Image (cartoon, helix red, strand yellow):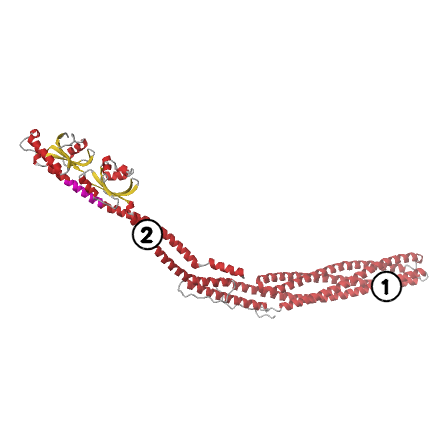
């Protein structure tokens, strides 16, 4: 009982739906939360980066416009200087103007005034070939070839792509001086970098964001760290060789991207500055926005965990509402597996599958109870001998097979018991006939024994008489006549004996046939008993009583077969012995006929009487031995006939017992017991 309780407890633990639902749901929710948090982390980071990049593009365009406005202001100043009347004279030609000291002084005054007012490092006038014509201190002797070529091509305000001037940072601008629509000079001035640096430094993005400029060749032209611009650093050097980003910046494209700068990941936006060969680049370290992203992630994770706990509580409540009915159903099914068909099923009214489950289990238990009660009633009636009983319950589904099997068993038992009844009746009749024939055989054997004893006595008398013949030869004829008379009488008796032996032989043949019939009946009875045992085994517990009857029938058939076999052997032996007796009787008859012939001739051959008497005495001795054998055979026949009579009586008794046992069963169809 302890082991069974432990097994039941283990099964209950293994089948705990509440724990399985909670464990599986919690595990699935945790996996889902982890996946969602991971996806949310990457998604939020990606979304934040994309939002920042998208927001940086208009910002860089606006910043580029601010820089562009400041450069336009410087360009307007340069255009004002180039358009000042002091630059040209309408009364003289170019060469005269250049040689005129008054004009030179006027221009020099203009240049010094512009340098002082507009914060220029230097400003100078250059000829169309780029040679210095007039300038303040520090003006280069010649304009750079690239810048001069650009001035010549544009023939308008031109800004030098490089911001390096005499190891300082400045903005070099050139403007053609026109007279009568023709360019006569180039005025070139270098603004101090502070004007542009103030604009770049005023662009602040986050804690560590900055703005700087690069030209079309990717060289840094403006940077909060002026050393980088003075060193001529390139964008490729700053962003660890990102040529794709460099190509987008140097082609004048407006956009935003992400690439490392000095080993740190940066968000970079860029836009060209119109009117120049520069592009403004805004860069913000991603690390500046990590705290915000992390805070948002932590808020999302905390909210997710709160939702997780709430979900677990809801799932636990749902699991309990499911597990309670399932546990009840499971416990009832365990009791059902242990054979409990009477405990009622606790119904659940939840209007879902659990209600259907409990209702179905209740219907199943009730159906099984009905079926088992019906089977018990049928088997009880069969055990009481009523084979006409019928099933009273309507079986459904696969249970119809049980009803059909029960009907088949009852029908088979009806047929078998009916066959046993007929066989028992026939066996009684045969045993009665065998008993009568055995009595006749016994009577014939008694008569045969009596005849043999009489023959022995007669032979003894013959021997005594032959001895008397040897004592008195004078009485030979008389004795011979008496012998002849005795011989004739012996012939008559021998004929009777021969007839009796023939009758015994005929009776022995009939007994053999009867014994053979008994043996066949016993064989058929054994087969019927075997079939009955098989059907009883199929019937299970209900067929135990029937199995006992079948076993007794089988034993009775075996005994009948053994008795019939023994009778057959005895009759066969008797037939051989009787045949020997017949042969000996014929020989004896022949001898008696010879004695009769000799007795007729005694009167004529008296001298041969002694020899003949001796011969007859020897013949009588042999006859005495043979008659003794016949007497012994007759005694055995008498004993065998008695045994056969007893066996036939036992067979009749067993047949009556079998018939009485078979009559206990009431067969279907209203047949008598």
Q: Is residue 535 left or right of residue 83?
A: right
Residue 218 in the image, given as x and y percentages of width and height: 24, 37
Q: Which residue is mark 2?
A: 298
Q: Which residue is mark 1?
A: 458
**Element marked by disc 1:** helix
The residue shown at (39%, 55%) is 26
Can you give x and y, in whole percent of width and height, for residue 649 in the image? Answer: 71, 66
Query: SS of the residue at dot 2?
Result: helix
Magenta highlight range:
59-73
Front-lying residue, 634 or 88: 88
Examine the structure image and report whether residue 65 is included in the region drawn in magenta. yes
Compared across the picture, whether 393 is left or right of 666 comes to left
* Image coordinates for residue 18, horizontal then vertical, percent: 43, 59
The one of 399 and 616 positioned closer to us in this rendering: 399
Q: Classify 48 as above or below 386.
A: above
Which residue lies most toward the left here?
91
Q: Is 355 drawn above or below residue 222 in the view shown?
A: below
Q: Which of label 1 and label 2 is nearer to you?
A: 2
């Amino acid at each position: 009982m302890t082991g069974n309780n432990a097994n039941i407890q283990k099964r209950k633990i293994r089948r705990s739906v509440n724990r399985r639902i909670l464990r599986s749901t919690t595990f699935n929710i945790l996996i889902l939360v982890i996946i969602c948090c991971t996806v949310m982390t990457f998604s939020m980071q990606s979304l934040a980066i994309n939002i920042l990049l998208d927001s940086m593009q208009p910002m860089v365009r606006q910043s580029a416009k601010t820089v562009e406005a400041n450069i336009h202001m410087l360009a307007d100043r340069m255009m004002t200087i180039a358009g000042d009347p002091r630059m040209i004279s309408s009364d003289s030609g170019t060469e005269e103007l250049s040689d005129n000291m008054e004009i030179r002084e006027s221009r020099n005054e203009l240049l010094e005034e512009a340098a002082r007012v507009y914060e220029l490092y230097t400003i100078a006038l250059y000829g169309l070939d780029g040679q210095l014509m007039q300038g303040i201190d520090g003006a280069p002797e010649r304009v750079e070839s690239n810048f001069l070529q650009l001035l010549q091509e544009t023939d308008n305000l031109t800004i030098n792509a490089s911001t390096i001037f005499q190891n300082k940072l400045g903005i070099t601008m050139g403007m053609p001086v026109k007279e009568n629509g023709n360019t006569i000079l180039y005025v070139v001035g270098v603004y101090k970098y502070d004007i542009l640096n103030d604009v770049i430094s005023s662009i602040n993005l986050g804690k560590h964001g900055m703005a700087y400029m690069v030209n079309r060749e990717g060289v840094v032209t403006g940077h909060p760290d002026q050393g980088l611009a003075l060193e001529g650093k390139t964008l490729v050097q700053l962003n660890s060789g990102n040529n794709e980003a460099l190509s987008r910046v140097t082609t004048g494209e407006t956009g935003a991207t992400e690439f490392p700068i000095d080993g740190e990941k940066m968000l970079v936006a860029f836009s060209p500055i119109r009117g120049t060969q520069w592009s403004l680049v805004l860069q913000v370290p991603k690390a500046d926005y990590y705290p915000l992203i992390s805070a948002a992630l932590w808020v999302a994770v905390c909210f997710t965990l709160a939702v997780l706990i709430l979900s677990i509580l809801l799932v636990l409540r749902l699991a309990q509402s499911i597990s309670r009915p399932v546990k009840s159903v499971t416990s009832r099914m365990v009791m059902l597996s242990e054979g409990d068909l009477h405990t009622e099923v606790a119904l659940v009214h939840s209007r879902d599958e659990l209600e259907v489950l409990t209702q179905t289990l209740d219907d199943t238990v009730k159906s099984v109870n009905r079926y088992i009660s019906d089977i018990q009633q049928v088997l009880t009636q069969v055990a009481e001998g009523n084979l006409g009983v019928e099933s009273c319950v309507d079986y459904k589904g696969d249970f119809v097979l049980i009803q059909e099997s029960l009907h088949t068993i009852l029908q088979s038992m009806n047929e078998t018991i009916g066959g046993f009844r007929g066989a028992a009746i026939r066996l009684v009749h045969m045993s009665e006939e065998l008993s009568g024939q055995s009595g006749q055989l016994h009577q014939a054997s008694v008569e045969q024994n009596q005849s043999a004893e009489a023959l022995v006595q007669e032979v003894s008398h013959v021997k005594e008489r032959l001895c008397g013949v040897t004592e008195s030869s004078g009485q030979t004829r008389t004795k011979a006549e008496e012998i002849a008379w005795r011989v004739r009488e012996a012939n008559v008796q021998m004929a009777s004996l021969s007839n009796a032996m023939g009758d015994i032989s005929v009776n022995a043949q009939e007994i053999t046939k009867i014994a053979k019939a008994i043996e066949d009946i016993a064989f058929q009875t054994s087969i019927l008993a075997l079939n009955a045992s098989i059907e009883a085994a199929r019937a299970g517990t209900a067929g135990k009583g029937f199995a006992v009857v079948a076993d007794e029938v089988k034993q009775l058939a075996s005994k009948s077969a053994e008795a019939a076999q023994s009778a057959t052997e005895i009759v066969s032996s008797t037939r051989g012995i009787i045949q020997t007796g017949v042969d000996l009787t014929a020989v004896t008859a022949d001898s008696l006929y010879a004695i009769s012939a000799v007795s007729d001739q005694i009167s004529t051959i008296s001298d041969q009487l002694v020899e003949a008497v001796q011969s007859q005495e020897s013949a009588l001795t042999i006859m005495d031995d043979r008659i003794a054998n016949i007497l012994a055979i007759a005694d055995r026949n008498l004993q065998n006939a008695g045994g056969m009579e007893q066996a036939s009586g036992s067979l009749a008794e067993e047949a009556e017992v079998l018939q009485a046992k078979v009559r206990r069963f009431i067969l279907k169809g209203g047949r008598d017991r």
